Amino acid sequence: MPATLTMNDTDLSLPPELERNLRKRAGQLRMLPAVATEALQIAKDPDCSLSEFAAVVERDLKLASDILKIANSALYSPTVPITSLHRAVVRVGFRECQNLIMAASMASLMNRMSLEHEWIRGVLWRHSFNTALVAIHLNRTFHFGFGGDEFTAGLMHDFGRMLFAVAVPDQFAEIDPLEFEEPEAILDNETAVIGTDHCRLGAWFARENQLPEALIDVILHHHQPNEARRARRLTALIRVADDMANHLQRHEESAGYQPEDNPALPVLKEFGEPGFATHFCEVAPALMQEAQKDAESLMQL
Ligand SMILES: [Fe+2]
Ligand SMILES: [Fe+2]
């Protein structure tokens, strides 16, 4: 693959009928409210101050209160409750705060979308959170060095499934029984029935929203991390977390999980410290329990 190739070269166009259905049923497909876009833009400026950033976010009350909730959650465990947005930004860190904006925006988009079967929202939301939190714990335990990108990528990796549920409700059960078994043929099956798969659909949505290219790469390749171009390490991390989250979804506990069978372990191993695979197999169950506990508290958002 030539090094100069970017995600912009990947054709992510949707079958026309699917795109029509989506635009009709999902309505406003913009993920980031205007204030969030402005805040993320400001954050790109290396000279931008925390106060300036917090002042912009504060103009969107829902966004500001979601960030405060996350900063006060078990994920950051402050000793004293945080009540000001400025302190929340200091507490969680500037870079992570940008990811919280994305997370809060995605949470409100998911809540706005209308579904024929309401229970699907909760199931997919739980899977997103479990994956994101397992990714956070993996990143912390094994020092992969991500500063919040793993949280956003975990939350968003399967957003295409939600979009399928919205756009093609009558065919959804056929393509996605929400069993979290994920047989190898899952993407081919989706393409045979709908004309595209949930990875491409999610990536299309991320590009529509001008989200970072690395995030588009993760969403597009999370079932084949080896094919990722710009963010292979993050894609492998998310795939490893995804497999663990699938087990949690099926069994509601880590018991019975076989870490050595994780399909993306060989890819992630390339980026791990010496002895990573052995260490991973030892700590995976405990790490899953931790992530699940955090997910319980954050799901209340
Ligand atoms: Fe997926
Ligand atoms: Fe997933």
Image (cartoon, grey):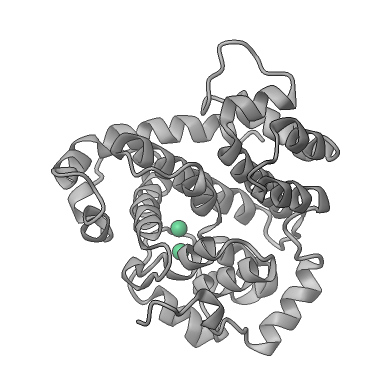
Q: Quadrant of ligand 2?
A: bottom left
**Residue ID at (40%, 60%):** 235
Q: 215 or 129, which is in the foreground?
A: 215
Q: 254 or 266, which is in the foreground?
A: 266
Q: Position of residue 135 (x, y in %)?
A: 41, 45
Residue extending farthest to the top is 80
Q: Position of residue 6 (x, y in %)?
A: 49, 76
Q: Quadrant of the N terminus?
A: bottom left
Viewer can see residue 108:
no
Q: 167 or 277, which is in the foreground?
A: 277
Q: Position of residue 203 (x, y in %)?
A: 56, 70
User: Splitting the image into 4 quarters, where does residue 89 fall?
Assistant: top right
Q: Is residue 196 left or right of residue 106?
A: left
Q: Quadrant of the C terminus?
A: top right
**Residue ID at (86%, 38%):** 59
Q: 4 or 293, which is in the foreground?
A: 4
Q: Position of residue 94 (x, y in %)?
A: 60, 36
Viewer can see residue 43:
yes
Residue 71, compared with residue 205, is above or below; it is above
Q: Is residue 182 left or right of residue 150?
A: left
**Residue ID at (59%, 24%):** 91
Q: Is residue 191 left or right of residue 63?
A: left
Residue extending farthest to the right is 59
Residue 175, compared with residue 11, is above or below; it is above
Q: How many marks?
A: 0
Residue extending farthest to the front is 47
